[in-house]
Image: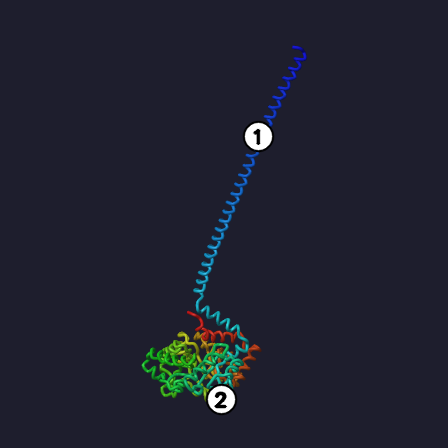
Amino acid sequence: MSDNGKRREQRRKRRIRGQILSYGFTAVVLAAVLAGCVLGVRAAAGAVIRRAQEREQSRQAAIEESQAAESQAAEEAVAAMLQEAVEEQETQETESAYSPEEALEELVEESVASLTLEQKVAGLFFVTPEQITGVAQAVQAGDGTREALAKYPVGGLIYSKQNIQSEEQIQEMLENTVSYSSFPLFLGIEEEGGKLSPVADALQLDKVDDMADVGASGDAQAAYDAGFAIGSYLSSYGFNLDFAPSADLYAQDSANAARTFSQDAQTQAQLALSAAQGMQAAGVSACLKHFPGQGRAQGDPADGPSETTRTKEEMAAEEFLPFQAAVQGGCDMIMVGHVSASAILGEDSGPASLSDEMITGILRKELGYDGIIITDALNMAAVTQYYESDVAAILALKAGADMVLEPEDFSLAYEGVLEAVQNGTISEERINDSLARIYRVKLRGRISQ
């Protein structure tokens, strides 16, 4: 073969090798491309799957988070309900532990604290409706009563037979009076039974016998029933306080002997307390009278000086016994009389009703009485012959009385006491103590047992 032929053959072989290489390279490239495509598809598919998984995981997480939140909210709601139930139970237990006595004390404190000084002073007076209205005979309560109580919000009004004309009249009068007062009122009368029965006499009711007749048998139940009977009809007309029973010891031949149960001190103490408890069970406060013991004194305080010469030891053995029983038996009020006890208080000592030693020293401290102490009527001659109305009222309150009954000149007495508190002769704390005792009785019915 010629050289040209050899060279052509060599060029042909080179072309074949080049084509083979080209085809191989193309095949490799195509394989690589195909492989890349497969890998790309796989990657894309993986990415899609991963995104789907991520979305599913997010959805599941959201569901779980929502469920957790709902569960937490439910748990919190249940916890709140349980806490509320616990607090309610604790409140109920606290309230149940909050005794009626404590509730009453809180109400009394709030009531006294809400009063102006003028209202506080007025609340220490117990007067007739005529004394604040200026009329000669009060038989109805209208605008005059409303205006009078707005000016002088007294602590109590005492009525007598002249104020009573019929059942409907007295009931309406008392109801109106209560409605006109901004503060709780004592509405009182002196209804002992027997000869001293203004309500029963005016309304022609069946009267309770004289206390001497009731006590003749020494039966405490009979005395209780008598007190309950009197309290029941008084309460039905609107009265809430009776200046009875009398706890005095009288001699058999005394004109007043029928007013008391017995001349024996022990029997008198037992029956007087029973009668008082009967009245109070009927909703009417009882007022035992006349401390330290008027029955054996010489002279009628309505006419002038009244004096007993009995010693403290003698009176403690007899006259004091009914009042000691009243202290122990929860009598709402005790009246201090105008008797002068010279053997106890000294010569020229004046009436017991104005004596610090008799009221605070003996009745309050020695006998331990913490109820309401009221004076006998300050318009009696035993007081008016020696003291002006303002002086008598100031002396009584300084001595420890909580209320003053019927001063001769109410306006003068009121202004005098008000000035005495303003200038410090009587401390405001002193009258607050009296008002607290008064309001404990007046407000106790508002506290549920």
**Residue 342 visible to the viewer:** no
Place residue 28 in its image quadrant. top right
Give the Cα distance between marks 2 and 1.
131 Å
* Label whose residue precedes the other's in the sequence (2 or 1): 1
Q: Residues within 10 Å of mark 1 (few under 14, many from 20)?
A: few
Tell me residue 439's x, y (percent): 47, 74
Location of residue 322 in the rendering, given as x and y in whole percent from the top left corner: 39, 78
x, y percent for residue 201: 39, 87
Q: Residue at x 50, y 49 (%)?
A: 66
Q: Which residue is disc 2 drawn over?
A: 136
Picture residue at 58% right of the left edge, 31% below the top: 36
Nearer mark to the viewer, of 2 and 1? 1
Asked whether disc 2 touches disc 1, contact meaning CB atoms under 8 Å apart, the reply is no
The residue under label 1 is: 34
Q: In the structure shown, which secondary structural element does the residue marked by tag 2 occupy?
A: loop
User: Quarter holding the C terminus?
Assistant: bottom left
Residue found farthest to the right: 4
Q: Residues within 10 Å of mark 2 (few under 14, many from 20)?
A: few
